[in-house]
Image (spheres, rainbow, N blue to C red):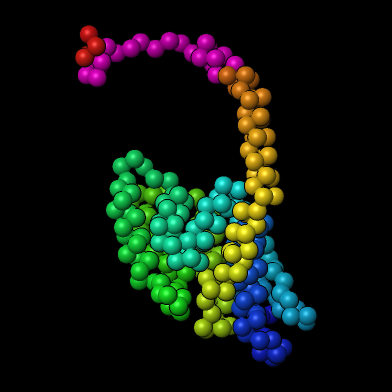
Amino acid sequence: SIKDFKKLKVDGDYLSGLIARIFVKSVLYHNIFHADPHPGNIMLLKNKNIALLDFGITGQLTPELTEKVFNLYMGLVNADVEMITEGLVSMGFISDETNKEKFKEEIRETWSKYYDTTLKQFNMSSFFWETINMGRKYGMRFSVEYILLIKAMVTTEGVVQKINPGFNFVKVSRPMIEKLIEERTSPEYLLKSAKKTLMDFKNLLVRFPVDAQKILTKLEKEEPKELDISDADMKKFE
């Protein structure tokens, strides 16, 4: 167990950093993560690596959601409040009635409480829970996968801070984010993304005639409905 890291003479800084990097890599590189990484589910091996146990609860992100998480995390690492705000807004399902500007302003105020230039006081778990509660106040709905991700993040941060009380999740994972940024702006990655976009478009064109025919067939089978001309919005055309 990782609780025995001192007996096994494993450095706390090393172990906490290893756990954090594995979590970030599983989310941003592999789009899947252990959703319950408490100490009992993390085994410390003799070679000073770790093994995750009991994958009864896991989360899997779609490529679209992974991209949103990456952009949000990039905002955290770079202390870019506008990127953080836009990232959080993109995570939720917002109704037309939601006052987005008011919500964004509250996010900015919340961010200012958590972040300083040295990253020493930033508590990522508290920040995300507060923004989720704030989002609910504004009628936002979040996907199950995103809620699971926050739960896993909170648990992971709690584990590493017990090992190393001075640990900062964002600061330690910064090199990984910078490497990802470099990879995703490389010509190879952009070419790969362009090819995927073209393939998706091609598949859409191939499916379109079939999907359109299904819609037309369904419309033909449905009985025509009478138009209520007495409706207030229609009277102006009389």
Decide: is 191 above or below 76: above
Most foreground residue, 165 or 2: 165
Which picture quadrant has residue 199? top right
236 is higher (above) or lower (below) than 71: above
Q: Is residue 80 above or below residue 202?
A: below
List the single residue furthest toward the front: 187
Q: Where does residue 95 sit, x and y in percent of width and height?
A: 36, 42
Residue 190 highlighted magenta (yes or no): no
* Residue 199 in the image: above or below residue 10: above
**Residue visible at 52% across and 10% down in the picture:** 220
The stretch drawn in magenta includes residue 224: yes
x, y percent for residue 114: 39, 72
For the record, the magenta segment spans: 213-234
Tell whether 19 sits left or right of 122.
right
Residue at 27% over, 11% down: 229
Q: Could you tell me residue 54's position as x and y percent?
A: 68, 65
Q: Position of residue 67 (x, y in %)?
A: 56, 51
Decide which of 107, 211 is in the foreground and name it: 107
Quarter placement of the C terminus: top left
